Image (cartoon, helix red, strand yellow):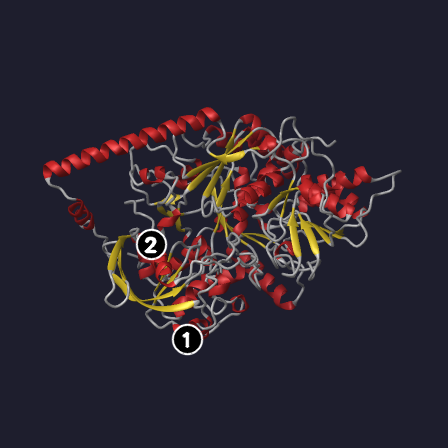
Amino acid sequence: MISQRLGLQGLRARPSRNLLPLRTPRTSLRALTSTAQRFQDVFHAQTEDPNASAILSSLKTPSKSPQTLTEKIVQRYSLGLADGKVVKSGDYVTLSPFHCMTHDNSWPVALKFMSIGASKIHDPKQIVMTLDHDVQNKSETNLKKYRQIEEFAKKQGVDFYPAGRGIGHQIMVEEGYAWPGTMTVASDSHSNMYGGVGCLGTAMVRTDAASIWATGKTWWQIPPIAKVTLTGVLPKGVTGKDVIVALCGLFNNDEVLNHAIEFTGSEQTMRTLPIDDRLAIANMTTEWGALTGLFPIDGMLQAWMRAKATTAALFDGKDTRFTHSRIDDLIQNQLVADKGATYAKSLYLNLSTLSPYVSGPNSVKIATPLRDLEAKDIKLNKAYLVSCTNSRASDLAAAAKVFKEASQSGKPAKIAPGVEFYIAAASIPEQEAAEDAGDWQALLDAGAKPLPAGCGPCIGLGTGLLEPGEVGISASNRNFKGRMGSPDAKAYLASPEVVAASALSGKISGPGWYEKPVGVEKVVLGEGNGIADEDRAISIEEALDKLIAQADSIIESAEQNILGTSTAAKEEADDEALTAILPGFPEKVEGEIVFCDADNINTDGIYPGKYTYQDNVPVEKMAEVCMENYDPSFGSIAREGDILVSGFNFGCGSSREQAATAILAKKIPIVVSGSFGNIFARNSINNALMGVEVPRLVQRLREHFSSTDIKEKADIKEPAENKESLDSPPPAQQASSAKEKVLTRRTGWKFVWDVRRSKVFVTEGEGGPTWSQKVGELPPNVQEIIARGGLEKWVKAEISGTAS
């Protein structure tokens, strides 16, 4: 039997043989500041939840409002807040992150940075550049790009890590850039990983990165926050990878889509989750659909940091971010969520009831107990121990142990005939630690094929990709179609030990380390905290809130009877609170509705991937191919000035900004949907494309035009040419009408968005009824960005000093 993976692998102290000297650490935190008037979310579905009435209370600003850990960290890094302002979920803030990391996309960001008139990075210590995605590509084009990035970083005085040094996210953690209690962003969707060390990490798109380079700041909206309570303890043979695979597959109805997650649990529970496991869990909260995945700053984390600081003091000298004095300061000023803080939802998972799980094939929303797949005798062609998710020294040690235990008479065990097993460490220090322990050599002796420290097969680049018809299993983070090679292959995800055991046996199997606790028959999970007394207390509190609301309603009715105040009058009074309109911003936007009746139209459907990495595509061409992959006839149906209306989760998928600019190129000024994909919503504002969510309109259009029968949903597919891993959480499966063949329809309906009154008006065809609905107020900071023509022009104004 194997012992629990939380000993020296979780708290290891070793010399760090770094390739590059480190610059002076930026240890001081920004002053605790605060924003002016609070405004409601323009994309209001991000704060709406049928189970989250508490979010509505955050629209108030009490003098002493309890905050979540997420809100407290954002408070530290928000600029221009009014005195006494307490930031809450739903707030738009001007954000100055502690660090911002870019990788292979650093050169495109640099071009955008220079194109907006910037020449000097605002704060070089804020920026980190790493080369990690296409490190196997030795073409002159790629090498030239790498040279340009390195030269730019050197000129700007920015910390730079060359190709082969490791994956950017791992570097951010092991070098101390992702520091507990800070907020660090990166132009990559797996920035969530920083939450494993108590650092609020989230993804930013290229325009945001360029804004941070030029001004040190950008804008951010605090998402709805979900609390995930972990109870029990991990059984032997169960890992952090099993935890997140189970969460993705068992809570698979978008429960945490576009949420910030805070993990919590008792001290006993959290002790069973070493830092490497937390990093794996936080990393894959991206696949779960979340924008962040934050673990507490607890004793386990402090012990890990102490070990890092001791090692640094012994071997690295003064040139390190890990010092005991800095850790002392962190502990003395430790951030924790306030008791009574408001969460949009609460979920729980009892770790004691968990067994090894496998994700797939081709979807993280499918999670199956390992024992069930073992019974199916699923043959394998390739196995992968790669990526920033599970390629640290502890992961390599677990995989090596599988082969060491299988060795006989001193003869190394070998991988199964016909199976290729690829390994790549998350970074050079992690590989060196595995080499020092003999684990790297053990894997090579078994027949594993080494790859340079980098992303490689995880992102579908370089050697060892899945071929048509092949089956692969990987310890990486994403497995939808085409992600790791051919879309005609099948990909599964599992823990490092299951991947190694599968490579050894030639089929999906485990090492036999799992010890099932007595009495456990199923996974225990659900809504709430998983603690009966606390959940009962919450239920009582909700019941009291309901009684109070009913009492308020009775009082309000009595006041109306006595004073003669009508509901209509009240609504009219509400309308008197008008939004100020900035110069250059339209008071009203109106046009005929063109309806694209589908949910989850991803960015590849809006702007084809084959054009994404082509530079200087003419505006006319962008307009021509807009929505081409969704409906080739869209271009001939839609007209200038139309209002594009679609279903829910519009713009999911990769973070390509052209999805927004192509719609503008088509001269469509606004998109209306039931809800937006988070990164598309961000790209829209950054590129001056307006958007508003009106679920009722989608419902009415479907009632009027669509069939009720739904055809079978299609498989998720990796967007083509997605070489820079700027992809957001994987899109949900698409669904559309089985009988209705019209993908794009001119409806004859009229839509008007009265921005000043924060209300939309819909006329359902000539002579049809007209109805209206209040929508979220467009806040001045976002309105200004749109009015100036997008974030780039706003940055130019900031640089030139003409911003008002």
- Return the residue at label 2: 696
First in sequence, mark 2 or 1: give its number. Answer: 1
* Residue highlighted by disc 1: 636
State the SS at label 1: helix
Query: Residue 205's spot in the image, x, y percent?
Result: 47, 56
- Left or right for 406, reference 194: right
Identified by mark 1, the residue type is Ser
Rounded to the nearest angstrom, the CA distance separating label 2 from label 1 is: 27 Å
State left or right for residue 91 relative to residue 287. Answer: left
**In the rendered view of the protein, which quadrant contains the N terminus?**
top right
Q: Nearer the viewer, residue 166 or 681?
A: 681
Q: For the C terminus, which image quadrant?
A: bottom left
Residue 148 location, x and y as percent?
Answer: 57, 63
Q: Nearer the viewer, mark 2 or mark 1?
A: 2
Q: Decide if residue 768 is on the left or right side of residue 181.
A: left
**Callout 1 environment at 10 Å: few (<14), some (14 to 19), or many (20+)?**
few
In terms of depth relative to the viewer, which is nearer, 93 or 589? Answer: 589
Taking the spot 53% from the left edge, 66% from the top edge, the residue there is 609
> What type is the residue that disc 2 sits on?
Arg
Q: Is residue 330 left or right of residue 446?
A: left
Specify the quadrant of the image occupied by residue 487.
Answer: bottom right
